[in-house]
Image (cartoon, grey):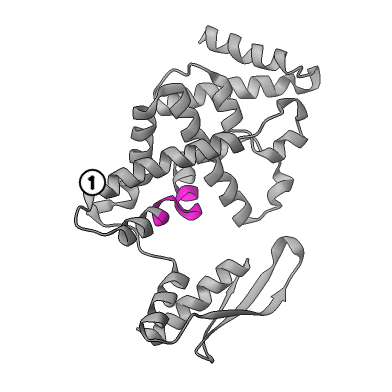
Amino acid sequence: MGQLFTRIKSFFSRNNIGNQEKKLEKIIIEKTKQIEKFFGFKINDPQYFIKALTHRSYLEVIPQLKKSNERLEFLGDSVLSLVVSDHLFETFEDEEEGFLTKYRALMVDRDALAKAATDMGLKNFILYDTRFVNGSNAGIKTILADALEAVIGAIYLDQGFQTAQKVINKWIIEPNTIDGNLPADKNFKGQLLEASHAKGMGSPIYKVMKEEGPEHDKKFTVEVIVDGKIYGTGEGKSKKSAEQSAAKSALQYFE
């Protein structure tokens, strides 16, 4: 562990972190120890994990950190997609591309990743400015999901593909395939689109009927129209969630 501390101190020294931010060095060392204990491996290069845990909003707090977790998020997303694709391909030998694509999307969407990150307690490790989320549940979900992808990228670089695969299997694939069952399809807009096309009624149209509340706490009301008729209404904190709610309501008629 002494060598690890030396590397972390070197990182802060190279990036000219001032005395005012020295407390951050202590936090990073403690968080790195926690990560090692949680995952059960010795970190080779702590810089990967420092960056993986740094949300871009934190660069405004400590500008000397310079880089956020966005590049590692990009890499981790690719590793995650490969592992999940391989699992689905090997498990469901008789299913076609559409089925595999749909369920890969379900297993790696923001909600699924945010839940996995929450179960892991990842929020306790992430460095972010609380002003960025301003109490928004959607905001923290995005931070958690992005951080998990970044951590997967960091594990891949630091420990190799097999270790990253084990982490993905344990925290993302296995919880989503209990007793061999895949997660429920919550893409109600996609289901409604398929149902309306199957009936020759064209594509659904979504209209925002009402927008209420302050900027940080909006509420949207959306109607969905199919073939000139209103089939459902939904509410949500974002346009997307309100549209999903309206589509879910409309599906009752189609079913």
**Would residue 249 be seen by someone viewing this image from the given angle?**
yes
Q: On the picture, is 230 further left or further right than 78? A: right
Position of residue 156 relative to residue 86, above or below, is: above
Image quadrant in which you'd find residue 162: top left
Per the rendered image, the range of residues in magenta is 105-115
- Left-right relation of 69 to 116: right
Can you tell which quarter of the image residue 210 is in? bottom right
Q: Residues within 10 Å of mark 1 (few under 14, many from 20)?
A: few
Name which residue lies at 27% across and 52% down.
178
206 over 103 or under it: above or below: below
The image position of residue 43, as x and y in percent, is 47, 19
Please state which amino acid type lies under the numbered disc 1.
Glu
Spot occupied by residue 104 in the image (x, y as percentages of width and height)? 37, 53
Helix or strand or loop: what does disc 1 sit on? helix
Q: Is residue 214 left or right of residue 183?
A: right
Pick the residue in front: 162 or 227. 227
131, 43: nearer the viewer: 43
Q: Pick the residue in front: 212 or 34.
A: 212
How many callouts does the rendering have?
Answer: 1
Q: Residue at x 69, y 67 (%)?
A: 218
Q: Which residue is mark 1?
A: 90
Quadrant of the rendering where the C terminus is positioned = bottom left
Relative to 104, say whether 125 is above or below.
above
Q: Residue at image x 38%, y 65%?
A: 185
The answer to which quarter of the image holds residue 67 is top right
Q: Is residue 113 magenta?
A: yes
The overriding secondary structure of the stretch rendered in magenta is: helix
